[in-house]
Image (cartoon, rainbow, N blue to C red):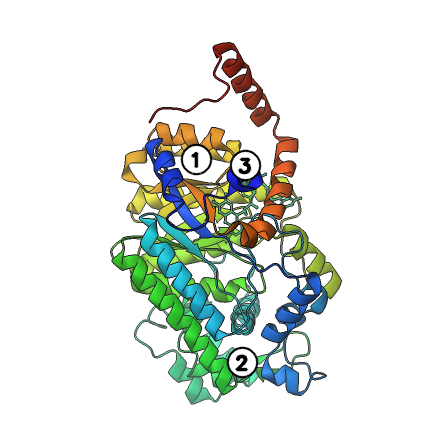
Amino acid sequence: MKMTFYGQFVAGEDHNSIKPLIRKNEAFGVGAVLDYSVEEDLTQEEAEKKEMDSCVSEAEKESPGADHREKKYKAHRQFGDRRGGVISARTYFYADEAKCDMQMETFINCIKASGNQPHYKPSDKTTLQFSEVLVKWRRFFNFLSAQQGKSQMTVLEQKLELEQLKESLTELGVGAKDDIENWFTGEKLGLSGTIDLLDWNSLINDTTKISNLLMVPNLQTGHLEPLLNIFTEEEERQMKRMLQRVDILAKHAVENGVRLMVDAEQTYFQPAISRLTLEMQRKFNREKPVIFNTYQCYLKEAYDNVTLDVELSRREGWYFGAKLVRGAYMYQERARAKEIGYEDPINPDYEATNRMYHKCLEYVLEEIEHSRKANVMVATHNEDTVKFTLDKMNEMGLSPTENKVYFGQLLGMCDQISFPLGQAGFPVYKYVPYGPVNEVIPYLSRRAQENRGIMKGSQRERSLLWKELRRRLLAGQIIYKPVY
Ligand SMILES: Cc1cc2nc3c(=O)[nH]c(=O)nc-3n(C[C@H](O)[C@H](O)[C@H](O)COP(=O)(O)OP(=O)(O)OC[C@H]3O[C@@H](n4cnc5c(N)ncnc54)[C@H](O)[C@@H]3O)c2cc1C
């Protein structure tokens, strides 16, 4: 295996054996994002069982017929195997807290070994429930915004008149007049006489206060329902442990001078993952960007998400850090939305995703141009996007030596992009998977498929390889070892 797929896509078995490869890449100006790639080799049935065991809340288990959650945020057995159709990302299934703690230890070792940056993936049932809460809360804002005739404006322009908002909330029966008055008496809230989505989101910062009590109207039935089905004690504990783990990882990252990239997942987990990442950014990105969130530009709402988070970082004065990707779960997302019956969250076609990527990227680059605080990783194998970034950096006078715009590709793929960038002095990183041969095989078999797909479309990479082969034959250098 080490002479074939493993050797091409995986750096080694553990954080020691990967060091020579990391050093070699660094000699060519290419850094590493460590990616511990062990996946359990589960059958589809086992994966589905694990997903259902871990993502169904206690309340749902006790009364399975009752309608506890919106269908998008419920676990569905037929989509329980989240690996289906996903080839550029690792998939973990929640087993128990002990296993999560073990994984955290692995991530800590990864941070210590790194010197560069590892990435992290949180997901389990509390993430699913919390995602639903955040989405319902945002949808409620959209509803109130429409009542004030502002739904056509961009998300940051939608500023709701405070007095009108209080009246609507009281009329809807969301709370008593005095309670609602109290919501908006915080330090910053309501001083301007308007409330935007960021102010609105800050109302559920302290989930133990308002959200446990809050009733929001179900926009389909018109009935009031609790924003949050109360967590059981065990679920509360799991949520707290997850926050603690994330906190420990972030502290290790700061201590070791390492940046931590949080990967993006499926849309039914992502709102909670983004929110947790944001809380970490608030806390740890005070002096420089340590924590990076990932934005998937195949999502219709990608631009709204990016602009909202950038605006929040401006208001609160922390360093925005983003990894921009197109998104790895397209087929699964589309199939799930169709089968379960909710709106497809993905852009209608590839061109729309490309436009979205460039729009989000341009927005972040402009932010860097103006504040010099934000950082972005352009994580893509798409040559047009890399060229677009280089042109924009040039236009905006963003020098690669400022280290604010990085590029990211996966190990073993698109070296014709990474290495010239590295040698030209641009910060560029390979996602470097590592792990024991047997345990990396499930991941590798999917990577092999992806590479086949990319190679099919990539005439350019093939012609470059032929050119190099011809050069080596003519120079009598079949086995070529560059000196560095
Ligand atoms: C360093 C790195 C880190 C990554 N981290 C993550 C992560 O955290 N989370 C994650 O989800 N993915 C992640 N990915 C994978 C990424 O999202 C893409 O799946 C992969 O990189 C291919 O996209 P591209 O921009 O490289 O290439 P391209 O070939 O230009 O784009 C392919 C992508 O375009 C989109 N697309 C294709 N067809 C359509 C269509 N018909 N309609 C709408 N959109 C379409 C899909 O997102 C598809 O993956 C990462 C990739 C890299 C290189």
Residue 3, which numbered label? Answer: 3
Q: Which residue carries the number 1 mark?
A: 389
Taking the image as shown, residue 162 lies to the left or right of residue 52, namely: left
Q: In this view, does 306 lie above or below 393?
A: below
Q: Nearer the viewer, mark 3 or mark 1?
A: 3
Residue 65 location in percent, x, y? 72, 83
Query: Is residue 195 in view?
Result: yes
For residue 190, which quarter of the picture? bottom left
**Pointer 1 or 2: first along the chain:** 2
Would residue 59 appear left or right of 478 to someone viewing this image? right
Q: Where is residue 282 in the image (x, y as percent from the top left)?
A: 33, 63
- The answer to the question of whether label 3 and label 1 lie on touching residues, with beta carbons closer than 8 A, is no
Could you classify mark 3 by the number of other residues whose Cα lies within 10 Å: few (under 14), some (14-19), or many (20 or more)?
few
Name the residue furthest right: 339
Q: Is mark 3 on a helix, strand or loop?
A: loop
Q: Which residue is drawn at 40% across and 71% down?
A: 243
Q: In which quarter of the image is the C terminus?
A: top left
Q: At 50% across and 35% down in the image, what residue appears?
A: 385
Name the element at disc 1.
helix
Q: Which mark is in front, 2 or 3? A: 3
Ligand 1 is within 8 Å of the C-beta of the residue at disc 1: no
Q: Which quadrant of the rendered structure holds the N terminus? A: top right
Label 2 or label 3, whichever comes before in sequence order: 3
Residue 455 x, y percent position in the rendering? 62, 32
Which callout, 3 or 1, points at the residue further toward the start of the chain? 3
